[in-house]
Structure formats: structure tokens, C-alpha cells
Image (cartoon, helix red, strand yellow):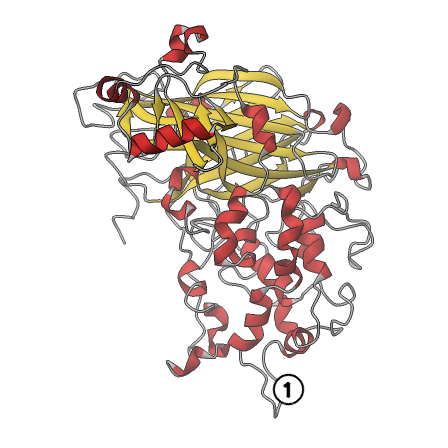
Amino acid sequence: MTVNRRDFLLRGSAAVAAVGAGTLLPGLPSSADASENQNPSVDSQSGAAQLPEGDAALPLVARIRDVRTGEMDLFFGEHEVTYRDPQLAARLFKAAQ
Amino acid sequence: MSSHREAPEISKDPVADSTDLYAFVSPDAPSTVTLIANYLPLEGPAGGPNFYEFGDDVLYEILIDNDGDARPNISFQFLFKTTVRNQNTFLYNTGPVQSLASPNWNRVQTYDLQRVDYPSGHVTVLGTDLPCPPCNVGQLSTPNYESALGAPAIQSLGTGMKAFAGQRAEGFYVDLGSIFDLGTLRPFQELHATFGVTGPLSAMSGINSTNTLNVHSLALQIPKDQLTAGGINPTDPSKQSSVIGVWTAASRKKVKFNEVFLGQPFEVGPWAQVSRLGNPLFNEVIVPMASKDFWNSSEPVYDSQFAKYVSNPELANLLPILYTPPSAAAPAEGAFPKLFSYNNGSPNRVDLLAILLTGIPAGTLSVAPSFQNFTGPTQADMLRLNMAIGPSGTPNTLGLLALDAAGFPNGRRVFDDVVTIELRCIAGVLAPGIVPGFPNPGDGAAGAIYDLVNGGTDTTVGGTENYLPNFPYLGVPHSGYNAPSVAS
């Protein structure tokens, strides 16, 4: 069921382009813990350096719908975007195991 | 009940669970319409020390369709914020709370209110940090509740609006304990089939299951011309432009982690609807249990997918079976033999489709041919109010069934007996002459059954009389000290 009307409820207009610093997967530690424990590198697509400092501190959640196609939903702030990156999805899936 | 705990998932999330929706021309301010959406079902007034409050993590909306397409043209949105003033006590209040500014009130809730117009998405901020009253704890904690706390929480906004958000006495009444016991209606239970579990039951008066309970209300009083398309003042009851469709919805963020992040539960993502309510009892008794949570997440514009449950409702099929069912040897006997006969054909209850999904077109009701609250052919569960019909000087809780066109199903007033009205409609009281093939006249029982209140002006049953003459109309909340009554 569509919930397009909800798009109007979104406050702010910043779009999230890709997985960035602070990526969380369900079942993994918080972003701060992940950074310390798993030594992640900043993805070249993340654009994290361009985010305002306050936004960069906010968590981002990725839900991988299909690891084979790399389709994932990204939740950031009050936004949800669909993103496809099979290689990234595979790396995240591996990291989560 | 109307919509209390009506679906499996939302029953576990009371702060987002809409219970009742009201929309009516304000009796004391007839140039305005009052909209009330209730949440938090079945509040026991003594439920401390963490007394009831709205969810800070819930987006509450009252939505208006004013052009008949079942999509919102206006959304009034409420977002709440709770502050704990004293971090070092478990108490809700550390002394008498005698004003909204009292330092003795430890857990304070405020809200922001905004109007969003569609399709532009234009946002108008109507108020920020508006105060909610505390819950009615008792005579020592919240003395002179209404004058000191309830009434001061009514906010007059600059647009001619009034707003209130906080605890109120439950206004909806129903004999819940009997109805959910296999459809028993105590006043008529001598006719109940009883499934052979007992012998014949004896008729008795109904019992109000919501008496002395509270709810949390979102209430708005709005000039009519702020609700219509183009800002017209609705004065002609025959015009479709005088009719609005109303519903309420509650939404939560899509993602929530049950761990503390930066001192708060971690939530992220867009709002996702988890509850909605238009007509009373729609999701409760029309939609099958397996679809109720889906219905809560969907929007009125897509409600044609649920029309099959309206055109052949399960309850209409149950009534003739539960109440002295006709037998093969005596098919004309029983309480609802004509409904039984109709159900055995190819039922298509166009009367219910009109009442619940499109509004009633003019010329439909032979007893009130000029009445209409039709919003167009789009099927959608919305509470439809013809705003050009003024308030009744002699209101009848049976509303339109008693030819009081200011009441349900033309909108809904706080005192309307919606359970009886819907029971009678489902039993077919309006069907003859409207529904092709429905026996005319129909069953006499269809116009007689009720669960609790016998007649449209009866206010003798506890909990059916506790209303205010002015905004926000729902009564002073029952206090924790007094309810349940010490005398009971």
C-alpha cells in the first residue's frame, strides 16, 4: 500500500545518497561501536565529508532486501531511499555474519 | 468497541491506538466544526505512578478530504514533547498541582500543532509548546481539576481555532462484556441461541463497560470556512461542497531500536501509519481480523478493496443465527427472518455501502429525502459531515435514525449511540426500499435492538451523560482517587 502522502510529512529536504559513516545493520552494534571494533573504511560514495557535522552524527540504517541484487533500503533522519549496490551489499552481509 | 484495541498489532500499542473520532457542528458555536480524535483506550483513572500521556514518538493527525477524492486536503498534525522536571523522584507530582505552571507537576507534556495543506504541502504552524493538562490523579494532587487544569489547557489560536489535547472522560459507551460474549445483547438475550451452553437467558439491562474510564483527546474547533475547498462558507445542505470526510491516523517512525542511542530510544526513517479511524466500528466489526492491521496501515482512498466486507457483512449474517434462528420447518420465525432470507440470496447491502463508504446521496432515505452527506463515488471509510446542517435543538442519540440529521452518520457527536445505530443499520432498519431485493417491510427487531441505552434521549446509564456543553465537550476525566468509586 502506498504511503506517498507521507512524503509531505518529511521535514527537511536533504537526500541521502549512499551508505555512509555510522551504517547500522539490525543485530550489529551501534555505529560508534562498529567504527571502533570493525575498522570500517569510509566508502568513496558516502559523501560523509560533505554532511554537516550534526547530520554526520546521526545514525543511518540499511536494510538489505536482496543481497544478490544489492537492493537495500536506507533510513536516515526522516527519509527512506532505495539503493542498489551488489558489492556493498555483499560486504555488509559478510560483515554481519 | 468503537475502535479500542480493534486490531491485533495496535492493541499492543495503546498510545497510537485511535479509539473514537467525532466531527460535528459545534452546538454553541455553529459557525465552527469540532473535531475530536481519541487515543489510549480504557484508561483506568488510578493508573499511576506513570499516568497516561500521548506518545512523543507518534505523529497524530486529523485529516480532512473536502473535494470527495478520499485523499487528504488538510492534515492537522500533533507532535508531543515530555519533560521531567525533577530527575530525583519517582512521583508524577510532588505536591498539589493547582495550575499548569505548578512546579509540583513533575512530568509535563506539551505539543506542537500544525496544519498541512495538500497537494501543495504548505505548512502553517498553529502553535508550539502548547500545554496539556496533567491526568486527573485525585483530590489532593489535582484539586479543582477542570477550572485549574482542564479549562486552562484550552488554547485559542490566532486563526479562530481552539485546541485541546489531554485526558477526558470516555464518551463512548457500549456493553462490551456482553457483545464480545458471542454477540449477546442483554436486553434481548432471552432470544439468544446460547449454543446449548445454558438454558434460555433472561433479559436484563445492559452494562456500560467504559463507565468511569478515561481517554486522551485531541480536540479542535475550527471555523467551517477553514475546512472547505476554496474557503467557502457551507450554507446549502444540498451541495456536495458542504460535506467533508474526516479521519484520524497515527504514525510511527519506520525503524526503532530498543536500545538507547544518545540518551533516547533510536528511531529513524519516515513516518509509517499504524492506526486510523473514520466511522466507528468499521475496522472493529467489518474488517476480518487477518486484515485489520493492514487496514490500519492503508489509506481511505484504497478502501474499495474492503467494500466486500461492507456489502455482505459478517455481523449481518450472524444476527439471524444468534437470535432464535429460523428453522427449515418455520423459515418465517425468529428475530430476523427477513434478514436471514435476504442473506441466503446474493446480498449487496448498498445501504451500508452508502452509510460507510460514500456517504448517503440525496433521495436515498424516504423519510428524509433531502438529506445527503455524499462525497462522491470513491469508496472510503471517512466520517462524513454535512456542515450546512446546523446543530439540533433537541438532539437524539440515535441521530439520523431518529431524524436528527445533526447526528451520526452525519458526522458524529460525543453522545451519539453509534453502537445501536450501527447494529440497527446492519440488521437492516434502513434497507427496505434502498437495497434491491430486501424484504419490505423488514424485520421489526431491526428497529428495536440495542445494547445499553433504550431510546434516543435516555441518559440514565452511567457514562452516557458525562459531557460538557462547551468545547471540548467530552467530560471532566474521572479521578484516580474516585474511580472506581469507593462506594462500589
Image coords of residue B100 (percent x, y) = 36, 20
Is residue B227 at all visible to an observer of this figure? yes
**Above or below — where is B462 with respect to B116?**
below
Image coords of residue B108 (percent x, y) = 33, 22
Q: Is residue B89 left or right of residue B131?
A: left
**Above or below — where is B440 with respect to A6?**
below
Q: Is residue B14 left or right of residue B23?
A: left
Instruction: From the image, tell me which residue sits under label 1.
Output: B331
Q: Quadrant of the N terminus of chain A?
A: top right
Q: Quadrant of the C terminus of chain A?
A: top left
Label 1: chain?
A: B
Image coords of residue B369 (percent x, y) = 81, 54
Image coords of residue B236 (percent x, y) = 81, 36
**Above or below — where is B362 with respect to B216?**
below
Say which residue appears at 77% left-offset and 24% top-offset.
B230
Q: Secondary structure at mark 1?
A: loop
Say which residue appears at 53% left-offset and 37% top-offset.
B249
Q: Is residue A56 left or right of residue B425?
A: left
Q: Is residue B445 left or right of residue B78?
A: right
**Residue ranking furthest to the left:** B88
Q: Quadrant of residue B298?
A: top right
**Above or below — where is A11 with respect to B233?**
above
What amino acid is labelled 1 in the image?
Pro
Q: Please rate how many residues cluster around mark 1, counting C-alpha atoms within 10 Å: few if below 14, some from 14 to 19, many from 20.
A: few
Front-most of B51 and A42?
A: A42
